[in-house]
Image: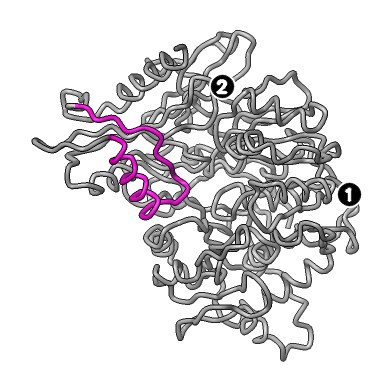
Amino acid sequence: MKPKCILDTSNKSKHGGTWLPGSTLNIADCCLQPNNYLKKQDDSIAIIWRDESCDDSDVEFMTLKQLREQVMLVANALDASFSKGDAIAIDMPMTVTAVIIYLAIVLAGFIVVSIADSFAPKEIATRLRVSKAKAIFTQDFIVRGGRRFPLYSRVAEADPLKIIVIPATGEDINVRLRNQDLSWKALLSSVDHLSRCNYYSPVYQPIDTVTNILFSSGTTGDPKAIPWTQLPPIRCAADSWTQIDGQPGDVVCWPTNLGWVMGPIFIYSCFLTGATMALYHGSPLGRGFGKFIQDAGVTILGTVPSLVKTWKSTNCMEGLDWTKIKSFASTGEASNIDDDLWLSSRAYYKPIVECCGGTELASSYIQGNLLQPQAFGTFSSASMSTGFVILNESGLPYPDDQACVGEVGLFPLYMGATDRLLNADHDEVYFKGMPMYKGMQLRRHGDIIKRTVGGFLVVQGRSDDTMNLGGIKTSSIEIERVCDGADESVLETAAVSVAPPSGGPEQLAIFVVLKPRFKIESDRLKMKFSKAIQTKLNPLFKVSFVKIVPEFPRTASNKLLRRVLRDQLKQELQIQSKI
Protein backbone atom coordinates (compact mmCIF):
# COMPACT_ATOMS: atom_id res chain seq x y z
CA MET A 1 0.00 0.00 0.00
CA LYS A 2 1.31 3.45 -0.91
CA PRO A 3 2.08 6.01 1.85
CA LYS A 4 -0.24 8.92 2.52
CA CYS A 5 2.75 11.27 2.32
CA ILE A 6 6.56 11.22 2.68
CA LEU A 7 6.77 12.86 6.12
CA ASP A 8 4.09 13.73 8.65
CA THR A 9 5.21 16.17 11.35
CA SER A 10 1.77 16.84 12.87
CA ASN A 11 2.49 14.79 16.02
CA LYS A 12 4.82 17.10 17.97
CA SER A 13 5.59 14.40 20.54
CA LYS A 14 7.51 12.50 17.85
CA HIS A 15 10.78 14.40 17.41
CA GLY A 16 11.60 12.63 14.15
CA GLY A 17 8.14 12.81 12.61
CA THR A 18 6.41 9.87 10.92
CA TRP A 19 7.92 8.69 7.64
CA LEU A 20 5.83 7.10 4.84
CA PRO A 21 2.70 6.86 7.03
CA GLY A 22 0.08 4.36 5.92
CA SER A 23 2.44 2.34 3.73
CA THR A 24 2.40 -1.46 3.86
CA LEU A 25 5.13 -3.70 2.45
CA ASN A 26 7.55 -6.53 3.06
CA ILE A 27 11.09 -5.22 2.69
CA ALA A 28 12.55 -8.70 2.15
CA ASP A 29 10.12 -9.27 -0.73
CA CYS A 30 11.36 -6.00 -2.25
CA CYS A 31 14.86 -7.52 -2.23
CA LEU A 32 13.77 -10.73 -3.95
CA GLN A 33 11.45 -9.65 -6.77
CA PRO A 34 12.55 -8.73 -10.33
CA ASN A 35 12.62 -5.00 -11.03
CA ASN A 36 12.92 -3.48 -14.50
CA TYR A 37 14.08 -0.12 -13.17
CA LEU A 38 16.99 -1.81 -11.39
CA LYS A 39 17.61 -4.09 -14.41
CA LYS A 40 17.11 -6.99 -11.99
CA GLN A 41 15.65 -10.12 -13.59
CA ASP A 42 15.22 -13.71 -12.43
CA ASP A 43 18.45 -14.74 -14.16
CA SER A 44 20.46 -11.80 -12.74
CA ILE A 45 23.32 -12.79 -10.44
CA ALA A 46 22.23 -12.02 -6.87
CA ILE A 47 25.19 -13.44 -4.91
CA ILE A 48 28.76 -14.42 -5.82
CA TRP A 49 30.81 -16.33 -3.26
CA ARG A 50 33.79 -18.55 -2.61
CA ASP A 51 34.86 -20.76 0.29
CA GLU A 52 38.24 -20.11 1.88
CA SER A 53 39.56 -23.55 0.95
CA CYS A 54 38.71 -23.08 -2.75
CA ASP A 55 40.84 -20.06 -3.62
CA ASP A 56 41.92 -21.53 -6.98
CA SER A 57 38.42 -22.60 -8.01
CA ASP A 58 35.88 -20.58 -9.98
CA VAL A 59 33.59 -18.36 -7.94
CA GLU A 60 30.13 -19.75 -7.24
CA PHE A 61 26.97 -17.79 -7.91
CA MET A 62 23.23 -17.76 -7.26
CA THR A 63 20.62 -16.09 -9.46
CA LEU A 64 17.82 -13.94 -8.12
CA LYS A 65 15.31 -16.73 -8.78
CA GLN A 66 17.45 -19.30 -6.97
CA LEU A 67 17.86 -16.95 -4.01
CA ARG A 68 14.12 -16.24 -3.85
CA GLU A 69 13.28 -19.96 -3.91
CA GLN A 70 15.79 -20.75 -1.16
CA VAL A 71 14.47 -17.92 1.00
CA MET A 72 10.88 -19.07 0.49
CA LEU A 73 11.80 -22.65 1.36
CA VAL A 74 13.24 -21.50 4.70
CA ALA A 75 10.23 -19.20 5.28
CA ASN A 76 7.91 -22.19 4.92
CA ALA A 77 10.03 -24.17 7.38
CA LEU A 78 9.92 -21.32 9.90
CA ASP A 79 6.14 -21.12 9.60
CA ALA A 80 5.89 -24.74 10.71
CA SER A 81 7.75 -24.06 13.97
CA PHE A 82 7.11 -20.47 15.06
CA SER A 83 4.34 -17.90 15.53
CA LYS A 84 4.17 -14.57 13.66
CA GLY A 85 6.14 -11.89 15.42
CA ASP A 86 8.52 -14.32 17.15
CA ALA A 87 12.11 -13.16 17.50
CA ILE A 88 14.68 -15.53 15.96
CA ALA A 89 18.40 -14.93 16.43
CA ILE A 90 21.30 -15.42 14.03
CA ASP A 91 24.81 -16.04 15.39
CA MET A 92 27.09 -17.22 12.60
CA PRO A 93 29.51 -15.93 9.94
CA MET A 94 27.99 -13.95 7.08
CA THR A 95 27.63 -16.72 4.53
CA VAL A 96 25.13 -17.24 1.73
CA THR A 97 23.09 -19.40 4.13
CA ALA A 98 23.08 -16.62 6.75
CA VAL A 99 21.75 -14.15 4.16
CA ILE A 100 19.02 -16.61 3.14
CA ILE A 101 18.01 -17.11 6.78
CA TYR A 102 17.93 -13.35 7.43
CA LEU A 103 15.67 -12.65 4.45
CA ALA A 104 13.45 -15.63 5.25
CA ILE A 105 12.84 -14.46 8.81
CA VAL A 106 11.76 -11.02 7.56
CA LEU A 107 9.75 -12.40 4.62
CA ALA A 108 7.73 -14.62 6.95
CA GLY A 109 6.84 -11.87 9.42
CA PHE A 110 9.29 -12.78 12.18
CA ILE A 111 12.00 -10.61 13.75
CA VAL A 112 15.75 -11.12 13.27
CA VAL A 113 17.90 -10.83 16.41
CA SER A 114 21.44 -9.93 15.37
CA ILE A 115 24.25 -11.48 17.46
CA ALA A 116 27.92 -11.37 16.45
CA ASP A 117 29.70 -14.72 16.18
CA SER A 118 32.61 -13.42 18.27
CA PHE A 119 30.61 -12.99 21.49
CA ALA A 120 31.20 -14.97 24.66
CA PRO A 121 28.28 -17.07 26.03
CA LYS A 122 27.36 -14.44 28.62
CA GLU A 123 26.97 -11.76 25.95
CA ILE A 124 24.93 -14.11 23.76
CA ALA A 125 22.67 -14.96 26.71
CA THR A 126 22.08 -11.26 27.47
CA ARG A 127 20.93 -10.57 23.92
CA LEU A 128 18.69 -13.63 23.85
CA ARG A 129 17.09 -12.55 27.12
CA VAL A 130 16.55 -8.93 26.13
CA SER A 131 15.09 -9.84 22.72
CA LYS A 132 13.02 -12.77 24.08
CA ALA A 133 14.29 -14.88 21.18
CA LYS A 134 12.47 -18.16 20.62
CA ALA A 135 15.37 -19.77 18.75
CA ILE A 136 18.81 -19.11 17.29
CA PHE A 137 20.53 -20.13 14.05
CA THR A 138 24.23 -20.95 14.30
CA GLN A 139 26.95 -23.18 12.82
CA ASP A 140 28.61 -26.20 14.40
CA PHE A 141 32.03 -24.59 13.89
CA ILE A 142 33.70 -21.54 12.39
CA VAL A 143 36.36 -22.57 9.87
CA ARG A 144 39.34 -20.25 9.47
CA GLY A 145 42.66 -21.09 7.84
CA GLY A 146 41.86 -24.79 7.84
CA ARG A 147 41.16 -24.77 11.60
CA ARG A 148 37.79 -25.38 13.25
CA PHE A 149 36.67 -23.17 16.13
CA PRO A 150 33.61 -24.28 18.16
CA LEU A 151 30.51 -22.12 17.77
CA TYR A 152 27.54 -24.37 18.61
CA SER A 153 29.01 -25.22 22.02
CA ARG A 154 29.48 -21.52 22.80
CA VAL A 155 25.89 -20.73 21.79
CA ALA A 156 24.56 -23.74 23.73
CA GLU A 157 26.31 -22.44 26.86
CA ALA A 158 24.06 -19.35 26.60
CA ASP A 159 21.09 -21.73 27.06
CA PRO A 160 18.72 -20.63 24.26
CA LEU A 161 15.30 -22.26 23.92
CA LYS A 162 16.17 -23.89 20.57
CA ILE A 163 19.25 -23.94 18.33
CA ILE A 164 19.11 -24.69 14.60
CA VAL A 165 22.58 -25.81 13.54
CA ILE A 166 24.08 -25.37 10.07
CA PRO A 167 27.18 -27.42 9.11
CA ALA A 168 30.22 -25.22 8.47
CA THR A 169 31.34 -27.69 5.79
CA GLY A 170 29.56 -30.51 4.01
CA GLU A 171 25.94 -31.52 4.50
CA ASP A 172 26.03 -33.00 8.00
CA ILE A 173 26.77 -31.32 11.32
CA ASN A 174 29.74 -32.53 13.37
CA VAL A 175 28.43 -31.96 16.89
CA ARG A 176 26.03 -33.72 19.23
CA LEU A 177 22.89 -31.65 19.74
CA ARG A 178 20.78 -31.05 22.81
CA ASN A 179 17.38 -32.78 22.72
CA GLN A 180 15.48 -29.61 21.82
CA ASP A 181 17.85 -28.57 19.02
CA LEU A 182 17.57 -29.18 15.30
CA SER A 183 19.92 -29.63 12.37
CA TRP A 184 19.60 -27.47 9.26
CA LYS A 185 18.78 -30.57 7.22
CA ALA A 186 15.99 -31.54 9.63
CA LEU A 187 14.49 -28.04 9.50
CA LEU A 188 14.32 -28.05 5.70
CA SER A 189 12.95 -31.59 5.56
CA SER A 190 9.97 -30.47 7.65
CA VAL A 191 8.40 -28.95 4.50
CA ASP A 192 9.07 -31.86 2.14
CA HIS A 193 5.34 -32.64 2.16
CA LEU A 194 4.43 -29.27 0.63
CA SER A 195 3.71 -29.36 -3.11
CA ARG A 196 5.21 -25.87 -3.55
CA CYS A 197 7.79 -25.63 -0.76
CA ASN A 198 9.77 -23.06 -2.79
CA TYR A 199 6.82 -20.66 -2.92
CA TYR A 200 5.75 -18.43 -0.05
CA SER A 201 3.28 -15.58 0.18
CA PRO A 202 5.12 -12.70 1.91
CA VAL A 203 3.71 -11.19 5.09
CA TYR A 204 2.96 -7.54 4.32
CA GLN A 205 3.08 -5.23 7.33
CA PRO A 206 3.04 -1.49 8.14
CA ILE A 207 6.28 0.39 7.53
CA ASP A 208 6.90 0.81 11.28
CA THR A 209 6.76 -2.94 12.04
CA VAL A 210 9.96 -4.21 13.70
CA THR A 211 11.94 -6.62 11.51
CA ASN A 212 15.37 -6.69 13.19
CA ILE A 213 16.71 -6.17 16.71
CA LEU A 214 20.31 -4.99 16.85
CA PHE A 215 22.41 -4.02 19.85
CA SER A 216 24.65 -1.12 20.76
CA SER A 217 26.64 -0.87 23.97
CA GLY A 218 25.47 1.59 26.58
CA THR A 219 27.64 2.91 29.37
CA THR A 220 26.04 0.68 32.02
CA GLY A 221 24.07 -2.54 32.26
CA ASP A 222 22.56 -4.34 29.27
CA PRO A 223 23.37 -3.27 25.71
CA LYS A 224 20.71 -1.05 24.13
CA ALA A 225 18.25 -3.13 22.10
CA ILE A 226 17.68 -1.13 18.91
CA PRO A 227 14.66 -2.11 16.80
CA TRP A 228 14.83 -1.67 13.05
CA THR A 229 11.52 -1.24 11.26
CA GLN A 230 11.13 -1.46 7.47
CA LEU A 231 12.28 2.15 7.12
CA PRO A 232 16.02 1.73 7.92
CA PRO A 233 16.59 -0.64 4.95
CA ILE A 234 15.27 2.07 2.62
CA ARG A 235 17.70 4.55 4.18
CA CYS A 236 20.56 2.03 3.71
CA ALA A 237 19.83 1.72 0.01
CA ALA A 238 19.44 5.49 -0.40
CA ASP A 239 22.83 6.15 1.23
CA SER A 240 24.51 3.51 -0.91
CA TRP A 241 23.10 5.07 -4.07
CA THR A 242 23.71 8.72 -3.21
CA GLN A 243 27.02 8.55 -1.38
CA ILE A 244 28.87 5.53 -2.82
CA ASP A 245 27.16 5.43 -6.24
CA GLY A 246 25.85 1.89 -5.84
CA GLN A 247 24.24 0.98 -9.16
CA PRO A 248 22.62 -1.99 -10.93
CA GLY A 249 25.44 -4.20 -12.18
CA ASP A 250 27.86 -3.32 -9.39
CA VAL A 251 29.50 -6.15 -7.44
CA VAL A 252 29.79 -5.12 -3.80
CA CYS A 253 31.90 -6.83 -1.16
CA TRP A 254 32.04 -5.74 2.48
CA PRO A 255 33.49 -8.17 5.04
CA THR A 256 31.19 -7.92 8.05
CA ASN A 257 28.78 -9.89 10.22
CA LEU A 258 25.03 -9.87 10.77
CA GLY A 259 25.69 -9.16 14.45
CA TRP A 260 26.82 -5.65 13.56
CA VAL A 261 24.87 -2.94 11.80
CA MET A 262 26.95 -3.27 8.62
CA GLY A 263 25.53 -6.77 8.03
CA PRO A 264 21.93 -5.67 7.41
CA ILE A 265 23.19 -2.49 5.70
CA PHE A 266 25.20 -4.67 3.30
CA ILE A 267 22.18 -6.86 2.48
CA TYR A 268 19.79 -4.01 1.75
CA SER A 269 22.38 -1.83 0.01
CA CYS A 270 22.90 -4.61 -2.52
CA PHE A 271 19.46 -6.06 -3.10
CA LEU A 272 17.51 -2.77 -3.09
CA THR A 273 19.86 -1.09 -5.59
CA GLY A 274 20.25 -3.98 -8.04
CA ALA A 275 23.87 -4.71 -7.09
CA THR A 276 25.35 -8.19 -6.72
CA MET A 277 26.50 -9.24 -3.25
CA ALA A 278 29.98 -10.78 -3.04
CA LEU A 279 30.72 -12.99 -0.01
CA TYR A 280 33.99 -14.66 0.96
CA HIS A 281 33.45 -17.59 3.34
CA GLY A 282 36.64 -17.20 5.32
CA SER A 283 39.04 -14.71 6.83
CA PRO A 284 39.43 -11.39 4.98
CA LEU A 285 42.95 -10.95 6.36
CA GLY A 286 44.91 -12.86 3.71
CA ARG A 287 45.59 -13.14 0.02
CA GLY A 288 42.71 -15.56 -0.53
CA PHE A 289 40.25 -12.76 0.15
CA GLY A 290 42.12 -10.43 -2.19
CA LYS A 291 42.09 -13.03 -4.96
CA PHE A 292 38.33 -13.39 -4.50
CA ILE A 293 37.96 -9.61 -4.96
CA GLN A 294 39.88 -9.96 -8.22
CA ASP A 295 38.06 -13.06 -9.51
CA ALA A 296 34.56 -11.86 -8.53
CA GLY A 297 35.08 -8.56 -10.38
CA VAL A 298 34.24 -6.49 -7.31
CA THR A 299 33.48 -2.86 -8.17
CA ILE A 300 32.82 -1.48 -4.66
CA LEU A 301 34.89 -2.75 -1.73
CA GLY A 302 33.96 -1.91 1.85
CA THR A 303 36.69 -2.05 4.47
CA VAL A 304 37.59 -1.46 8.10
CA PRO A 305 40.83 0.51 8.72
CA SER A 306 42.43 -2.22 10.86
CA LEU A 307 41.86 -4.66 7.99
CA VAL A 308 43.61 -2.33 5.54
CA LYS A 309 46.52 -1.94 7.97
CA THR A 310 46.96 -5.73 8.02
CA TRP A 311 46.90 -5.98 4.22
CA LYS A 312 49.50 -3.24 3.95
CA SER A 313 51.83 -4.58 6.65
CA THR A 314 51.79 -8.16 5.29
CA ASN A 315 51.94 -7.12 1.62
CA CYS A 316 49.54 -10.02 0.96
CA MET A 317 47.69 -8.29 -1.90
CA GLU A 318 50.76 -7.65 -4.04
CA GLY A 319 50.28 -8.56 -7.72
CA LEU A 320 46.49 -8.89 -7.60
CA ASP A 321 44.31 -7.06 -10.13
CA TRP A 322 41.80 -4.82 -8.37
CA THR A 323 41.33 -2.45 -11.30
CA LYS A 324 37.60 -3.19 -11.62
CA ILE A 325 37.08 -1.42 -8.28
CA LYS A 326 35.52 2.01 -8.90
CA SER A 327 35.41 3.08 -5.24
CA PHE A 328 36.18 1.96 -1.71
CA ALA A 329 34.14 2.59 1.42
CA SER A 330 35.48 2.64 4.96
CA THR A 331 33.70 2.58 8.31
CA GLY A 332 33.86 1.31 11.86
CA GLU A 333 36.84 3.28 13.12
CA ALA A 334 39.17 6.16 12.28
CA SER A 335 41.24 5.74 9.12
CA ASN A 336 45.00 6.18 8.83
CA ILE A 337 45.97 8.50 5.98
CA ASP A 338 49.02 6.45 4.89
CA ASP A 339 46.95 3.24 4.89
CA ASP A 340 44.24 4.96 2.85
CA LEU A 341 46.78 6.10 0.30
CA TRP A 342 48.10 2.55 0.00
CA LEU A 343 44.57 1.14 -0.41
CA SER A 344 43.62 3.68 -3.06
CA SER A 345 46.79 2.86 -5.00
CA ARG A 346 45.67 -0.79 -5.34
CA ALA A 347 43.03 0.38 -7.85
CA TYR A 348 44.75 3.25 -9.67
CA TYR A 349 43.94 5.72 -6.86
CA LYS A 350 40.20 5.28 -6.79
CA PRO A 351 38.35 7.30 -4.11
CA ILE A 352 37.70 6.08 -0.56
CA VAL A 353 34.32 7.13 0.80
CA GLU A 354 34.47 7.45 4.59
CA CYS A 355 31.25 6.59 6.48
CA CYS A 356 30.34 7.42 10.09
CA GLY A 357 26.96 6.73 11.65
CA GLY A 358 25.35 4.40 14.14
CA THR A 359 23.09 1.42 14.61
CA GLU A 360 20.32 3.70 15.87
CA LEU A 361 20.64 5.85 12.73
CA ALA A 362 20.64 2.95 10.23
CA SER A 363 23.11 4.91 8.18
CA SER A 364 25.90 7.47 8.18
CA TYR A 365 25.25 11.02 9.31
CA ILE A 366 28.55 12.25 7.85
CA GLN A 367 30.08 10.70 4.79
CA GLY A 368 32.21 11.22 1.75
CA ASN A 369 30.76 11.19 -1.73
CA LEU A 370 31.86 11.20 -5.36
CA LEU A 371 30.69 14.74 -6.17
CA GLN A 372 32.94 16.71 -3.80
CA PRO A 373 36.72 16.84 -3.32
CA GLN A 374 37.76 14.20 -0.78
CA ALA A 375 40.65 14.01 1.68
CA PHE A 376 41.86 10.73 3.15
CA GLY A 377 40.59 10.02 6.65
CA THR A 378 37.93 12.75 6.56
CA PHE A 379 34.26 13.25 5.71
CA SER A 380 33.29 15.86 3.15
CA SER A 381 29.72 16.58 4.28
CA ALA A 382 26.57 15.43 6.01
CA SER A 383 24.89 12.53 4.24
CA MET A 384 21.94 13.39 2.00
CA SER A 385 18.94 14.82 3.93
CA THR A 386 20.91 14.93 7.21
CA GLY A 387 21.38 18.15 9.16
CA PHE A 388 23.59 18.81 12.16
CA VAL A 389 25.41 21.49 14.12
CA ILE A 390 28.63 21.37 16.13
CA LEU A 391 28.10 22.57 19.71
CA ASN A 392 30.54 24.49 21.89
CA GLU A 393 30.99 23.77 25.61
CA SER A 394 28.00 25.96 26.40
CA GLY A 395 25.75 23.96 24.07
CA LEU A 396 25.60 26.73 21.47
CA PRO A 397 26.17 25.94 17.79
CA TYR A 398 29.24 27.18 15.97
CA PRO A 399 28.59 28.96 12.65
CA ASP A 400 28.43 26.44 9.79
CA ASP A 401 31.48 27.95 8.08
CA GLN A 402 33.71 28.14 11.18
CA ALA A 403 36.55 25.71 11.92
CA CYS A 404 35.81 24.20 15.32
CA VAL A 405 35.72 21.16 17.58
CA GLY A 406 32.67 20.10 19.58
CA GLU A 407 29.87 17.62 20.15
CA VAL A 408 27.60 16.98 17.19
CA GLY A 409 23.87 17.68 17.51
CA LEU A 410 21.73 16.01 14.84
CA PHE A 411 18.57 17.50 13.42
CA PRO A 412 15.71 15.26 14.60
CA LEU A 413 14.02 14.79 11.21
CA TYR A 414 16.25 11.90 10.18
CA MET A 415 14.83 9.20 7.92
CA GLY A 416 15.57 5.73 9.28
CA ALA A 417 16.60 6.78 12.79
CA THR A 418 15.02 4.97 15.72
CA ASP A 419 11.99 6.32 17.56
CA ARG A 420 12.09 3.70 20.34
CA LEU A 421 14.36 1.35 22.29
CA LEU A 422 13.23 -2.02 23.67
CA ASN A 423 14.96 -1.76 27.03
CA ALA A 424 15.62 1.93 27.65
CA ASP A 425 13.92 5.32 27.48
CA HIS A 426 14.51 6.54 23.94
CA ASP A 427 13.91 10.22 24.74
CA GLU A 428 16.24 10.10 27.72
CA VAL A 429 19.02 8.44 25.75
CA TYR A 430 18.88 10.57 22.60
CA PHE A 431 17.10 13.84 23.40
CA LYS A 432 17.09 14.72 27.11
CA GLY A 433 19.49 17.58 27.86
CA MET A 434 20.16 18.42 24.21
CA PRO A 435 19.66 22.08 23.24
CA MET A 436 16.98 23.52 20.99
CA TYR A 437 18.00 24.85 17.59
CA LYS A 438 15.65 26.82 15.36
CA GLY A 439 12.67 25.30 17.14
CA MET A 440 14.02 21.75 16.92
CA GLN A 441 15.12 19.52 19.80
CA LEU A 442 18.53 18.29 18.65
CA ARG A 443 19.25 14.56 18.72
CA ARG A 444 22.26 13.24 20.65
CA HIS A 445 24.77 11.00 18.89
CA GLY A 446 27.80 11.35 21.14
CA ASP A 447 30.60 12.05 18.66
CA ILE A 448 33.07 14.88 19.07
CA ILE A 449 33.87 16.15 15.58
CA LYS A 450 36.30 18.66 14.17
CA ARG A 451 35.53 20.89 11.20
CA THR A 452 38.73 21.95 9.45
CA VAL A 453 39.44 25.29 7.78
CA GLY A 454 38.72 23.63 4.45
CA GLY A 455 35.35 22.34 5.67
CA PHE A 456 36.29 18.67 6.03
CA LEU A 457 35.04 16.75 9.08
CA VAL A 458 37.11 14.54 11.37
CA VAL A 459 35.73 12.39 14.23
CA GLN A 460 37.76 13.09 17.38
CA GLY A 461 36.18 10.54 19.72
CA ARG A 462 33.14 10.17 21.97
CA SER A 463 31.60 12.67 24.35
CA ASP A 464 30.64 9.86 26.73
CA ASP A 465 32.75 6.92 27.84
CA THR A 466 31.86 4.64 24.96
CA MET A 467 34.86 3.48 22.97
CA ASN A 468 35.32 2.02 19.52
CA LEU A 469 37.63 -1.01 19.43
CA GLY A 470 38.17 -2.55 16.01
CA GLY A 471 34.85 -1.20 14.80
CA ILE A 472 32.98 -2.56 17.84
CA LYS A 473 31.50 -0.07 20.28
CA THR A 474 31.82 -0.94 23.94
CA SER A 475 31.82 0.97 27.20
CA SER A 476 34.57 1.77 29.67
CA ILE A 477 32.48 0.31 32.47
CA GLU A 478 32.14 -3.07 30.73
CA ILE A 479 35.93 -3.28 30.31
CA GLU A 480 36.61 -2.10 33.86
CA ARG A 481 34.20 -4.60 35.40
CA VAL A 482 36.19 -7.45 33.85
CA CYS A 483 39.63 -6.00 34.63
CA ASP A 484 38.81 -5.25 38.27
CA GLY A 485 38.57 -8.98 38.92
CA ALA A 486 41.48 -10.10 36.77
CA ASP A 487 44.09 -10.06 39.57
CA GLU A 488 43.99 -9.84 43.36
CA SER A 489 46.39 -6.87 43.32
CA VAL A 490 43.90 -4.62 41.48
CA LEU A 491 41.98 -2.04 43.53
CA GLU A 492 40.29 -0.33 40.56
CA THR A 493 40.79 0.25 36.86
CA ALA A 494 39.91 2.93 34.32
CA ALA A 495 39.59 2.04 30.64
CA VAL A 496 40.08 4.63 27.91
CA SER A 497 40.84 4.48 24.21
CA VAL A 498 42.94 6.80 22.09
CA ALA A 499 43.93 6.97 18.45
CA PRO A 500 47.68 6.98 17.67
CA PRO A 501 49.20 10.43 16.88
CA SER A 502 49.52 9.39 13.22
CA GLY A 503 45.83 8.42 13.10
CA GLY A 504 44.18 5.04 12.81
CA PRO A 505 42.05 2.73 14.95
CA GLU A 506 41.58 3.45 18.64
CA GLN A 507 43.82 1.58 21.07
CA LEU A 508 42.70 0.33 24.48
CA ALA A 509 44.57 1.54 27.56
CA ILE A 510 43.93 0.41 31.13
CA PHE A 511 44.95 2.64 34.06
CA VAL A 512 45.32 0.73 37.34
CA VAL A 513 45.36 1.62 41.02
CA LEU A 514 46.85 -1.25 43.10
CA LYS A 515 45.76 -2.32 46.55
CA PRO A 516 48.05 -1.23 49.41
CA ARG A 517 51.23 -3.33 49.77
CA PHE A 518 50.67 -5.12 46.44
CA LYS A 519 53.24 -5.01 43.64
CA ILE A 520 52.98 -6.34 40.07
CA GLU A 521 54.55 -5.49 36.72
CA SER A 522 52.38 -3.67 34.18
CA ASP A 523 53.29 -6.20 31.46
CA ARG A 524 51.94 -9.02 33.62
CA LEU A 525 48.72 -7.10 34.22
CA LYS A 526 48.45 -6.42 30.50
CA MET A 527 48.54 -10.16 29.82
CA LYS A 528 45.94 -10.89 32.52
CA PHE A 529 43.63 -8.09 31.40
CA SER A 530 43.81 -9.22 27.77
CA LYS A 531 42.95 -12.79 28.70
CA ALA A 532 40.03 -11.74 30.91
CA ILE A 533 38.57 -9.33 28.33
CA GLN A 534 38.89 -11.79 25.46
CA THR A 535 37.29 -14.57 27.51
CA LYS A 536 34.46 -12.64 29.13
CA LEU A 537 33.69 -9.88 26.61
CA ASN A 538 35.09 -10.27 23.12
CA PRO A 539 38.12 -12.16 21.75
CA LEU A 540 38.72 -9.35 19.24
CA PHE A 541 39.55 -6.77 21.94
CA LYS A 542 43.26 -6.12 22.57
CA VAL A 543 44.90 -4.22 25.42
CA SER A 544 47.61 -1.93 24.03
CA PHE A 545 48.76 -0.11 27.20
CA VAL A 546 48.65 -0.66 30.96
CA LYS A 547 49.74 2.09 33.31
CA ILE A 548 49.87 1.81 37.10
CA VAL A 549 49.05 5.09 38.88
CA PRO A 550 48.68 6.01 42.59
CA GLU A 551 45.13 7.39 42.20
CA PHE A 552 42.56 8.51 39.64
CA PRO A 553 41.46 12.09 38.98
CA ARG A 554 37.88 12.62 40.21
CA THR A 555 35.23 15.29 40.47
CA ALA A 556 34.05 16.73 43.78
CA SER A 557 31.23 14.16 43.71
CA ASN A 558 33.83 11.39 43.23
CA LYS A 559 33.02 10.72 39.56
CA LEU A 560 35.96 9.27 37.66
CA LEU A 561 37.43 11.70 35.11
CA ARG A 562 38.36 9.34 32.29
CA ARG A 563 38.71 12.36 30.01
CA VAL A 564 41.72 13.57 32.05
CA LEU A 565 43.38 10.15 31.81
CA ARG A 566 42.68 10.05 28.08
CA ASP A 567 44.27 13.47 27.60
CA GLN A 568 47.33 12.44 29.63
CA LEU A 569 47.82 9.35 27.50
CA LYS A 570 47.40 11.34 24.29
CA GLN A 571 50.10 13.76 25.44
CA GLU A 572 52.50 10.93 26.31
CA LEU A 573 51.95 9.23 22.95
CA GLN A 574 52.47 12.54 21.18
CA ILE A 575 55.81 13.04 22.94
CA GLN A 576 56.90 9.47 22.16
CA SER A 577 56.05 9.92 18.49
CA LYS A 578 58.39 12.92 18.29
CA ILE A 579 61.34 11.15 19.93
Residue 491, horizontal then vertical, whole percent: 17, 39
Viewer-closest of 211 and 521: 521
- Which quadrant would the N terminus be assigned to in this image? bottom right
Query: Disc count in the image?
Result: 2
* Direction from residue 282 to residue 394 in the image, left or right: left
Above or below: residue 463 compared with residue 523: above
Which of the 4 quarters of the picture holds residue 157?
bottom left
Q: Gap between marks 2 and 1, in whole Å?
A: 37 Å
Question: Which numbered dot is residue 37?
Answer: 1
* Direction from residue 395 to residue 264 in the image, left or right: right
Viewer-closest of 432 and 370: 370
Residue 31, horizontal then vertical, whole percent: 75, 58
Q: Which residue is at a point 17% across and 26% down the rendered structure image?
A: 550
Above or below: residue 20 compared with residue 159: above
**Mark toward the start of the polypeptide (2 vs 1):** 1
Question: Are there few (<14), some (14-19), or many (20+) residues within 10 Å of tag 1?
Answer: few
Q: How is the image coloured?
A: one colour
Q: Which residue is at a point 47% across and 24% down the rendered structure image?
A: 448
Residue farthest to the left?
517
Residue farthest to the bottom?
193
Q: Tell me if residue 532 is in the magenta stretch.
A: yes
Q: Secondary structure at mark 1?
A: loop
Q: Which residue is at a point 19% across and 33% down the rendered structure image?
A: 513
Which marked residue is nearer to the observer: mark 2 or mark 1?
A: 2
Q: Amino acid at mark 2?
A: Val
Report the residue marked by disc 2: 458
Highlighted range, magenta: 522-549
